[in-house]
């Protein structure tokens, strides 16, 4: 498997420009593994150094970090990476719909116009729109999508755990 690398430096301040010269060894790289792009921090090593190592913080997110490392390793050693188990196909489809609904709401589209695009097979006349289940679905998609945009997307990467 060939890794495509794009080495870049993270500026110390927002006003700094990205340097045009290659970064030093304590920088970050982006690599493509399977269909995903991963960002790695090089701590005094070169991108071709073998073998690699991972430092894992021990906190509430440790199981998620270990899963990410395992997926990365499988991506390096297998032809394809299996889908992320934290998001089911149904949840992935709902996330797409939520983001489409948010985009439409930000463009000042009505819930009914959004429903027409997201559910073209469902036709509702104006008189029965107020009590239609699709209307409630669109409202929930818009509301939940706005929560994602307002920072809730971080929760997508956390696996649900029992207290």
Image (cartoon, grey):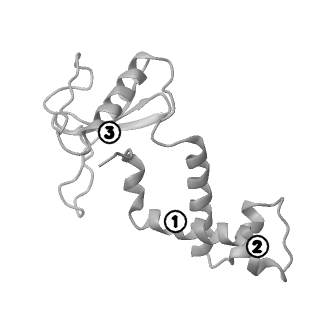
SS at mark 1 in the image: helix
- Outermost residue, front side: 163
Task: Kindly identify the residue that appears in the image at 78 percent across and 78 percent down.
Answer: 129
Residue ID for mark 3: 64
Left or right, residue 50 beside residue 140:
left
Give me the residue at 31% from left, 30% from top. 69
Question: In the rendered view of the protein, which quadrant contains the N terminus?
Answer: top left
Work out whether 39 lies above or below 127: above
Give the mark toward the camera: 2 or 3.
2
Q: Whole-percent x and y of residue 87? A: 49, 43
> Crowdedness of circle 2 by 10 Å Cα count: few (<14), some, many (20+)?
few
Q: Which residue is mark 2?
A: 132
**Tag 3: Cα neighbours inside 10 Å, few (<14), some, or many (≥20)?**
some
Q: Could you tell me which residue is drawn at 39 percent across and 28 percent down?
A: 71
Give coordinates of residue 52: x percent, y percent. 23, 21
Depicted 56 relative to depicted 161: above or below:
above
Task: Tell me, yes or no, whether the two marked residues, 2 and 1, touch with CB atoms within 8 Å.
Answer: no
Secondary structure, mark 3, is helix
Q: Earlier in the sequence, mark 1 or mark 3?
A: 3
Q: Which residue is mark 1?
A: 144
Query: Would you identify the image quadrant in which residue 95 lies?
Result: bottom right
Asked whether 16 or 73 is in front, the reply is 73
Q: Quadrant of residue 105?
A: bottom right
Residue 127 quadrant: bottom right
**How far apart are the two marked residues, 2 and 1, measured between alpha carbons?**
19 Å
Residue 17 appears left or right of 129: left
- Which labelled disc corresponds to residue 58? none
């Amino acid at each position: 498997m060939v890794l495509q690398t794009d080495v870049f430096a993270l500026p110390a301040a927002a006003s700094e420009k990205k340097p045009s010269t290659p970064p030093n060894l304590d920088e970050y790289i982006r690599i493509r593994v399977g269909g995903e792009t991963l960002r790695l921090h090089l701590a005094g090593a070169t991108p071709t150094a073998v073998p690699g190592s991972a430092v894992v913080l021990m906190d509430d997110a440790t199981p998620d970090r270990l899963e990410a490392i395992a997926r990365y390793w499988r991506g390096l050693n297998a032809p394809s990476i299996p889908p992320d188990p934290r998001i089911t196909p149904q949840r992935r489809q709902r996330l797409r719909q939520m983001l489409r609904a948010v985009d439409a709401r930000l463009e000042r589209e009505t819930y009914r116009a959004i429903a027409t695009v997201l559910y073209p097979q469902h036709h509702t006349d104006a008189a029965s729109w107020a009590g239609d289940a699709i209307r409630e679905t669109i409202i929930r998609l818009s509301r939940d999508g706005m929560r994602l945009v307002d920072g809730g997307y971080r929760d997508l990467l956390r696996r649900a755990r029992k207290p």
